[in-house]
Amino acid sequence: MKLALVGISHHRAPVELRERVAVELAAAAAIARSLARDGEAVVLSTCNRTEIYLAADVDHELDARATGALLELADERGEEIAPVLYRLTDESAALHLFRVAAGLDSLVPGEGEILGQVRAAYEVGATGPLLDRVFRQALHAGRRARVETAIGESPASVPAAAAALAQQVFDDLHGRNVVLVGAGKMSELTARNLVSRGARIATIANRTVAHGAELAERLEARTVSLDHVGADLYDADIVVASTSAPGFVLLAGELEQEVRARRGRPLLFVDLAVPRDVDPDLAAFDGCFVYDIDDLEAVVEASLVGRRAEAVRAERIVAAEARRFQDWQASLAVVPAIASLRARAEEIRAAELAKAEGRLGRLTESERRLVESVTAQIVNKLLHLPTVRLKQAAAAADGLIYADVVRYLFGLEGEDGGRR
Amino acid sequence: MAELLIWPALVAYGEAALAYAGILRAPGFTGRFAIWGVRLGWLAQTALLVVQALRADGFPWGTWAGALNLFVWLVVGAYLVWGCNARFRLLGVLVMPPAVALLVASWAGGGTGVAGGVHSGTLLGAHVGLMLAGLAGLSVAAGMSALYLWEERSLKRRDSRLFRLRMPPLDALDRIAAKIAAVSLGLLSVGIVLGLARLRSGEFDAAMAVTLGLWLLVATVLALRWEIGLRGRRAATLLTAVVAFVAVVLPITHFA
């Protein structure tokens, strides 16, 4: 069976071209069904790539069909799309998919969303034996890369870094109270990151209470003016500050009483503003931690360095999985011969047993079962080594030759569609 | 021959100690080797203790060296409860090197042999066992508190390496250290009661005074936590300092 991949990704195509061929999951499923015909098809479409995987018994212009589908999606920009497409087949296509699933082909190494996207594409695709195997193995490779390395563990954006920092201090964020100082976009992004990990937005403090109210309604929080935020600090666990104020909004001198009343309970200040909103002297209080935008970007940078180092180990895992897939695909060439051989052996066994039944006389049920079992074991033992060696030969690229020899020796020509 | 069981325990613990040091340089990779070293070493040491219990003539851990052997086993066992969780693996950096050193000291002092023992009855055995278990628990709690202080300082300094090291969450260290201290206090309490039960007039000595002082200090730290919410750096500093002080003074008073 042949495997072909045609795709477009962020490596070679800008977003203006990628967005022309990006499709939702339902559309991807429909395209896959229409392309499958007498083969198999899966369409993987994310914000960074659209890839079409096709498989068939013979190479029924797989490349041309996949390319045609992408050009049709691109419509009038098809001429711009064509030069940036990439094409891979068989082992290369499988290795590419494994790398994609492991996050090794992503903008940020090890990003987690892609594994779910590959799974979703697989579930709605028109799969058969080959694409089913390659996608299941890709998902396995992706999981192995994330479990056996630290490639996906550390944060890759400032909001994610803030949320990871909060978890580093508080462990489980469920029930933790967050105070937002300022109602800007960054504040909201960070807040949503925290909420996704179980935190609760308790209060939004903004100079313009009305603007803060809109965000508060979206996040189900109460609003206060900036002058009254101190009172909320006693119950807060995390303070995210992102105002456009020209100087510090949260001053150590003004908040000392509220902070000391906490008796060392951890309080994390995340200052996303430039100029800074949070007075660095607050870090001197017991239990207070102050992180500004530079600190968070340093966390992200250190995280990316770590991810790149882990990517080397993940590449080894993915390469090993690709070799396993290659061996399996090679063994497909000999599967029909093995199946025919076993079928023939079983035929002979059943026929000889039937002949012998008359000579053996009346057998009890248990004796019959015993004879069946022994003869079946003899057949299995005899065929075990040839089966194993045929598969090994297939992995070593001699499979078809050995399969032909087996067909000739056992008179299996034509039974499995094998070569004559 | 059974005495030779100490060697696989020492080798495995030593490998774990080195592997934990390796975690600080290359996070993740050596962690698995480290925890397996601890597990295998602990199993070997368990086998040694079982043989000691079966063959010794008397209570085998009544000497300072024997008590050290049992103490190390208890500390490493307590560590394994959390150390198998990848988040707490870094605690091994603080637990395993001292464990190796103390086990070597025990071996040098004859505490890992299978002959000999102290003849003093069940009450002594129970007293020693409970006291050592309580002290082992407090050692692990102090280790967690020390790790808390290290991490808190790193967070204050905004050290971006924290995420690569896979440090346990700060709040988790604080909570778990307090729980272990509370359980250990319970064990110490029973051990002290048993000790007082077999105490004869005029036998109250410096070691007992230090032990009672330890009990009082740990109880005070825990009471302050529950009554007024004392936690974080101050609570961790108190617990670490108390246990470290006792770790130095108690052996001197007990075995000198």
Image (cartoon, coloured by chain):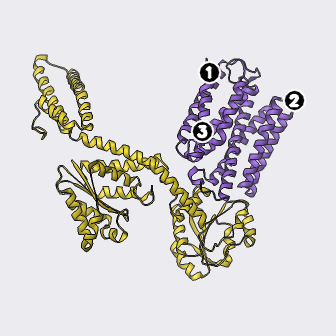
How far apart are the two marked residues, 1 and 3, measured between alpha carbons?
23 Å
- Residue that carries the numbered disc 1 in the rendered image: B4
Residue B30's place in the image compared with B70, above or below, is: below
Label 2 residue SS: loop
The subunit letter for the residue under badge 3 reads B
On the image, the x and y values in percent for residue A240 come to: 60, 69
* Residue A158: x %, y % from top left: 54, 65
Chain under callout 2 = B
Q: Label 1 marks which chain's residue?
A: B
Viewer-side label of 2, 3:
3
| Residue at image coords 18%, 39% | A336
Q: Name which residue type carries label 1.
A: Leu
Marks 2/3: CA distance? 37 Å
Which label belongs to residue B203?
Answer: 2
Amino acid type indicated by mark 3: Leu
Mark 1, secondary structure of its residue: helix
Label 1: how many residues lie within 10 Å, few (<14), some (14-19) or many (20+)?
A: few
Q: Position of residue A306 (x, y in %)?
A: 52, 53
Mark 2 Cα shell of 10 Å, populated few (<14), some (14-19), many (≥20): few
Kindly identify which numbered label has been placed on residue B80: 3
Camera-nearest residue between B232 and B134: B232
Residue at 68%, 24% (x, y): give it. B112
Q: Is residue A33 above or below residue B63?
A: below
Dot placed on the residue nearer the N-terminal end, 2 or 1: 1
The chain letter of the yellow chain reads A
**Chain B painted colour:** purple
Which amino acid type is shown beneath numbered disc 2? Answer: Glu
Pick whichever of labels 1 and 3 is earlier in the sequence: 1
